[in-house]
Image (cartoon, rainbow, N blue to C red):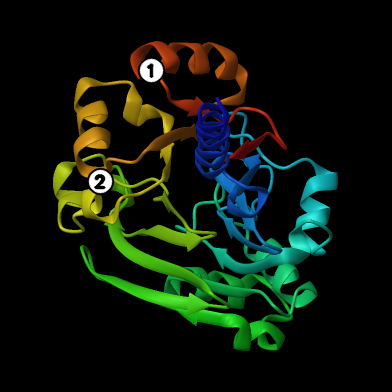
Amino acid sequence: MRSFSKNILLSLALALTVCAQSRPSANAIVKALYVGNEGVLVSHGGKAVLLDGLHREYGPDYLFPPPDLLSAMESAQPPFDQVRVVLVSHIHLDHFHPESVGLHLKNNPKAVLISSAQTMLEVAKNYKDHETVRSQTREYTPEWKQKKQFDIDGIKVTVLGLKHGSDRFWWVKNLGHLVEIGGKKLFQFGDADMTVENFAAFELPKEKIDVAFVPYWYFLSDAGRKLVREQIAAKIYVAVHIPPATAAKEAENLSKLFPGVRSLTTIRQELEF
């Protein structure tokens, strides 16, 4: 009887240990705060990466940060004081505003901007104090299908050279970003052209991506969904760039077309991974 009780206790202890190990601890959680259009603040352990978040009102088809949120980002108020890396995929104004980027860098000396020469030129032309933040910039303009890794304050960022969608934007440098933070790997890629050739050279399935932030139109066609599954192969997909006027309808439609996809539709919406 004593032996039986002992075995029961050991079994319970083992079960509790397994449950505890399978449940992610608070220290293992990476958070994403939505700031509009394709913009997200990804944070873990008191450090954060701001991806395509520093933009202003542009047009009715794009969700933009309201004045109080924009002010908090530009002045590096919490939680944006945690930002160590600012990433800009390309220079279109629904993803980037040069003055907003400059102001954040000025008010957050710990932040580093990584982006293309086009982005740096726009900041230099349109932010009057650009000389004071130049030391906080890392310019990298990859050729198509080329990549480079940066390590900023323990955060790894791999910048990928991707073509922008639509022939009329052939001249726009569009960057993809693989971000490694808090033991998770996240992928964001601006408005990359939706073709297999644009992604295949990077062999992204080998990266074992945890979370991919994907423009919603990729999920609307068979070809787009196939590309997402085969060329990105993330564990979790998050739809972004959803027009605000039809956000609820689009999110519902996406969940039918691509079961399991999460949609960012509301300013300050939060996700945990």
Discs 1, 2 touching: Cβ within 8 Å: no
Q: Label 1: state its secondary structure.
A: loop
Residue under the point 78% across and 56% down = 79
Residue bearing the label numbered 2:
167
Which mark identifies residue 213? none
User: In the visual, does 205 lie left or right of 238?
Assistant: left
Which amino acid is tagged 2?
A: Asp
The C terminus lies in which quarter of the figure?
A: top right
Work out whether residue 152 or residue 122 is closer to the camera in this orientation and state it.
152
Residue bearing the label numbered 1:
259
* Inter-mark Cα distance, 1 to 2: 31 Å
Work out whether residue 28 or residue 272 is closer to the camera in this orientation and state it.
28
First along the sequence among labels 1 and 2? 2
Give residue 183's position: percent from left, percent from top.
48, 58
User: In the visual, does 78 lie left or right of 193?
Assistant: right
Q: Label 2: state its secondary structure.
A: helix
- Give the quadrant of residue 36: top right
- Give the quadrant of residue 78: bottom right
Residue under the point 38% across and 67% down = 158
User: In the visual, does 126 lie left or right of 15?
Assistant: right
Residue 149 visible (yes or no): yes
Which amino acid is tagged 1?
A: Pro
Give residue 159's position: percent from left, percent from top.
37, 66
Work out whether residue 137 or residue 263 is closer to the camera in this orientation and state it.
263
Of circles 1 and 2, the one toward us is: 1
Give residue 134's position: percent from left, percent from top.
61, 86
The N terminus lies in which quarter of the figure?
A: top right
